[in-house]
Amino acid sequence: MAKIKSVYVCQECGYENPKWMGKCPECNKWNSMVEEIREAKTTSTPVNSLTTLTGNASVPKSIGNIKSGEKERIDTGVKELNRVLGGGLVKGSLTLISGAPGIGKSTLLLQTAYNISKNSGKVLYISGEESEEQIKIRGDRLGVKSEELFIVSETNMDIIEEHINNLSPAFVIIDSIQTVFKSSVASAPGSVSQVRECSNIIMRLGKKENIPFFIVAHVTKQGELAGPRVLEHMVDTVLSFEGERTEEFRILRTMKNRFGTTSEIGVFEMSEEGLVEISNPSMIFLEETNFEVEGSVVIGIIEGSRPMLVEIQALVSETKSPMPRRTSVGVDHARVNLILAVLEKKLKIPFYNCDVYINVVGGLNIEGTLGDLGLAIALVSSIKGKVSKYEKIAIVGELGLTGEIRPISFCDRIINEAEKMGFKNIVIPYRNSLKCKRNNINIIGVSSLKECILKIFS
Ligand code: TYD
Ligand code: MG
């Protein structure tokens, strides 16, 4: 009989130790070690199947003889999802979708499952969280009606495997990985060992049968993936579904993608009939923008391959507190501090006695530096109580520590987007402006922050 042993496993990173420890020496997390019972002989995967992902015996081949890596892709019927995946769903790939509860993961996947079942064959939706009836109610709400879409409420991995073998679906969804379990592993569903074992089985199944899998994973309160980091390493693609529950916009972001870039985003709106794709986000983000108010500036950014215009708002108010507040939503804190320092040092505008609040409208998170200049202008506009003398103006540019405006890449694309959105004026770095000639939009080239302020405020 196999010997039973107990190990303590860090639920964060998967580190194992025979004794309990208060702090994991691997990831330094406190209180994350949990006891898991395991039979000594059951290693998490049989060695022979690890060596061969596709189930065939592995043979080393010369790289010249291996068929090109471009894999066949399935159209998910959701353009924004196709874009985020890098042009559709790759056959045999394993995709992880994470997000806070209630954000709309199950809704998005049910809609995707329906679309794929209409065009590409059988789809199996396995839910460990909801009953078949509950999914049916959601399906009715979304107008899902398909003979090819199969729903099963199941958590036992052995039975799931059997269902997949019997049905031979073209696409499988598992909602969620934290609820499924393998009976030979003694620990509870959601524990590191279970998640690792089940993901391994799913991965092998997918690669062997060439079936794409989507698995749902929960996130912790801090927004990190619940459970082990190992999961992220194992899968091909990690998508994160974000947004405020109270706001209707949802943003699908790629965190990792073996088949495309990681900088693409997809934008959705949660409606009564499920998630609706938003192919022109600028329009939505600028819907309620009032160009006549202090502290509001429209900036141009590039998200993935897509230019986008968003409104950024700054509110600067005097305070007597010795520790003024610096609050920013949608912009990196360090970036805001850097821009404030440049404004104080180079333009002699004092912020030390002011609370500063920054907000990006629409719940978008701005990464990169294209919005720097716009943010600086929003701060100046708020503290001085001034509005740009140009109507319908957008601003784009990277700010250097000496107050200089650096040239940016993809400036053309942002100008095109601004033109399309009916903007009359756009501020861009001087060096970029030398190469841009437009008829329908007035281009204002600036080489320093000071020059920009002099030019746009009357
Ligand atoms: P759900 O997909 O169950 O979220 P998750 O799987 O990420 O936990 O979505 C739940 C929320 O979405 C719920 O609060 C209701 C809302 N919703 C709509 O607004 N419209 C719809 O058509 C559907 C199906 C859900
Ligand atoms: Mg769900």
Image (cartoon, rainbow, N blue to C red):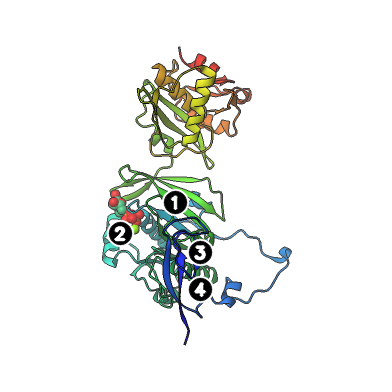
User: Label 3 vs label 2: CA separation?
Assistant: 41 Å
Count of numbered circles in the view? 4
Name the residue type under label 1: Ser
Q: For the point 40% across and 43% down, which residue is it?
A: 278
Residue under label 3, please give it.
15
Q: Do tag 1 and tag 2 residues touch (Cβ < 8 Å)? A: no
Residue under label 2, please give it.
139
Q: Is 61 in front, or is 177?
A: 177
Residue 85 x, y percent position in the rendering: 50, 53
Residue 195 x, y percent position in the rendering: 44, 66
Q: For the point 38% across and 45% down, which residue is it?
A: 243
Circle 4 Cα neighbour tier, 10 Å, few/some/many (<14 / 14–19 / ≥20): some
* Quadrant in which the C terminus appears: top left
Q: Do tag 4 and tag 2 residues touch (Cβ < 8 Å)? A: no
Q: Earlier in the sequence, mark 4 or mark 2?
A: 4
Q: Which residue lies furthest to the top in this view?
A: 458
Q: Earlier in the sequence, mark 4 or mark 1?
A: 4
Residue under label 1, please give it.
240
Residue 453 x, y percent position in the rendering: 50, 17
Name the residue type under label 3: Tyr
Vertical arrangement, residue 111 with respect to residue 65, above or below: above
